[in-house]
Structure formats: C-alpha cells, structure tokens
Image (spheres, grey):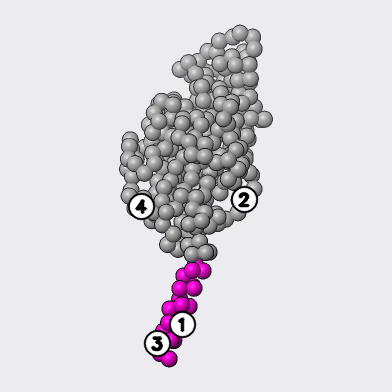
C-alpha cells in the first residue's frame, strides 16, 4: 500500500483489516461528448493521436467484485503514468467529471479541462480528502507530499479518494432530504442525532452507480495531448494502486463515512490502455510524395 493511502485513510479514520474482496481498475477512452460509465469491456487500443487529432480523453474506472454482501468502494489511491513519455512530448491535464449543476451527478457534455475540487479530476463522491488538501486531487507532472515526479514520463500523482463527510452526503440519493445524515440510517427523517458507531446500509440503487458496487464507474478523468508525433504506442497505466471496500456506512468523529477495510494487494488488478501515436495521414502522404520527387530527380540526373 502506498504511503499516500496510508496517511490519508488514517486521517479519515478508515483503517481496517485486509479482506478477500477484489477491486479492478482500468483506463478507458472517453467519448468527446459523453462519459463512459459502462460495465462492458471497452475497446482497445484507444484512438490514434495525430497532429490533426492530438488529444485523447480518458477515465480511470473501478469496480468491486467478489467478497460478501455486495461490497462497494470506500477509498483508493493510484498514480496515472505514461511510462517513457517525457514531459516535452505533450501535456496531461484533468478533465471535468461532475455535472455543471453541482448536484453530484456525472458530467455528460463536451469534454473540457477542469481541475476544481469536486468538479474536475476526481469524482465528487470521493473528494473528501482533496477538499482538505488539493494535492490528493492529483499532482500533474510535479512533486509533492510522498510523490516524486519523474521527468521521463507523464504523470498525475498522489491521487487519493475517500467517500466521507460532505463529499459522501452530496452524492445523489445518499441524503435525499438534506438532513446531514445517510438516508438509510434508522433515525433518518425523525429528527434523531446519530451516536458514534451508528451504522447504515448501502442503498442498492446508489451503490453500483456511485460506489462501484459490482459495476465500473468513473473515478477520475484526464486528457493527454501529444505535441511530438514520432510513431510510437503509449501505455496509459496506473502505478501504486490500492483500495478499500465497505458494506455499510458508520457515524464516527462527527461525520458519516464507509466502515472500510483494506483490499489485499494481490486482489487489486489494473488494466492499462494502449494509444498509438503517428503522423497524420496527410503528413505521411506528403512524406511519400517527397520520396517520389527525390527518386524522380535522381533518375533525371542519371539520364
């Protein structure tokens, strides 16, 4: 487990014992007009980057599988890395992920860069720690905290999410009456005040959509724009991935959060995305034409 997740989860009081649940992370290509949020295996590789179409929009997704009682994703940490792709070869940036209405739903409009906490980069339901320290929303090709940037690769580092406090309660359907409590808590709607240790179940209508309960959801969105079009294939990968899962919410230290446990490293899997980079077809055609012209000149000289 990474240092960033250990320290962040200690801060959020989410530490737990390792368990048998499995968490799958993957990077997928996003549409230019809509987010993915799909359960099926996405096509790979990603769309080719060229000088005519230099940018690709991507999402880190996760789902929780195995384990008992429909486990959901409580928290996570990872670094987004493009190994062997120097900073000078392009730019990596955070994308809008949540709705313009600020209602906690996912954004489905034309992709646009955005680094505001709860709006761009990390999904809002996991942005509790990022609201305390913006570094947890990801450091773009820069060092900070326990993360050290490597100039020889593109990176967004120190990404750490936790579904706690106001970030949790702002998730659609979690606190439907705006009481400041989880709606499935037994005292909800009668004016009660939770006691420390009170628990609440995960609404089965909400868990799959916002907490990766058996279904892939977007955790993070980003864009890569190439400026060097030497032919190559990029591997968009995750490094230092770690996760926590939960089966119920708990009220502790004055706020609601997941009653979480750590997922064993062997049960955390990651699937990268391959993205080809090549000169635009028009450029390639011009190169070919140039070769023909050169050959004709050589033949003319010989004659």
Residue that appears at 33% across and 48% down: 150
Residue that appears at 58% across and 35% down: 107
Q: Is residue 279 magenta?
A: no
Labelled disc at residue 88:
4
Instruction: Give the image location of residue 57, x and y in percent.
Output: 52, 46
Instruction: Give the image location of residue 257, x and y in percent.
Output: 51, 24
**Number of marks in the rendered image:** 4
Q: Which image quadrant is residue 71 in?
A: top right
| Badge 4 vs badge 1, beta-carbon distance below 8 Å | no
Q: Is residue 289 magenta?
A: yes
Question: Which residue in the structure is indicated by mark 3?
Answer: 301
Instruction: Give the image location of residue 115, x and y in percent.
Output: 45, 35
Disc 4 on helix, strand or loop?
Answer: helix
Cα distance, mark 1 to mark 2? 50 Å
Question: Which residue in the structure is indicated by mark 2?
Answer: 41
Say few, some or many: other residues with alpha carbon within 10 Å of mark 3 (under 14 / 14 to 19 / 20 or more). few
Q: Earlier in the sequence, mark 4 or mark 2?
A: 2
Horizontal arrangement in the rendering, residue 175 relative to residue 164 (left or right): right
Up-down relation of residue 49 to residue 59 (above or below): below
Placement of the C terminus among the 4 image quadrants: bottom left
Question: Which residue in the structure is indicated by mark 1?
Answer: 296
Disc 2 on helix, strand or loop?
Answer: loop
């Amino acid at each position: 487990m990474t240092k960033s997740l250990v320290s962040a989860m200690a801060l959020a009081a989410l530490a737990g014992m390792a368990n048998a649940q499995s968490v799958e992370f993957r990077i997928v290509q996003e549409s230019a007009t809509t987010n993915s949020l799909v359960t099926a295996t996405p096509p790979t590789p990603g769309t080719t980057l060229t000088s005519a179409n230099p940018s690709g929009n991507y999402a880190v997704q996760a789902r929780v599988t195995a384990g008992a009682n429909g486990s959901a994703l409580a928290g996570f940490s990872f670094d987004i890395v493009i190994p062997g792709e120097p900073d000078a070869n392009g730019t990596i940036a955070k994308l809008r992920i949540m709705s313009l209405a600020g209602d906690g739903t996912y954004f489905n409009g034309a992709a646009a860069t955005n680094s505001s906490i709860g709006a761009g980069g990390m999904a809002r339901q996991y942005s509790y720690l990022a609201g305390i320290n913006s570094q947890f929303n990801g450091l773009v090709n820069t060092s900070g905290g326990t993360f050290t940037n490597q100039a020889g690769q593109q990176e967004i580092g120190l990404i750490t999410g936790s579904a706690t406090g106001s970030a949790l309660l702002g998730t659609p359907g979690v606190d439907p009456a705006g009481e400041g409590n989880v709606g499935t808590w037994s005292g909800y709607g009668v004016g009660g005040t939770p006691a420390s240790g009170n628990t609440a179940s995960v609404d089965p209508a909400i868990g799959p959509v916002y907490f990766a309960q058996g279904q892939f959801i977007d955790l993070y969105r980003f864009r890569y724009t190439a400026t060097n079009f030497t032919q190559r294939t990029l591997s968009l990968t995750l490094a230092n991935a770690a996760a926590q899962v939960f089966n119920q919410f708990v009220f502790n230290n004055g706020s609601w959060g997941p009653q979480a446990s750590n997922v064993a490293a062997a049960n955390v899997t990651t699937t990268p995305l391959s993205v080809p980079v090549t000169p635009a077809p028009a450029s390639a055609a011009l190169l070919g034409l140039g070769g023909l012209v050169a050959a004709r000149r050589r033949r003319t000289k010989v004659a």
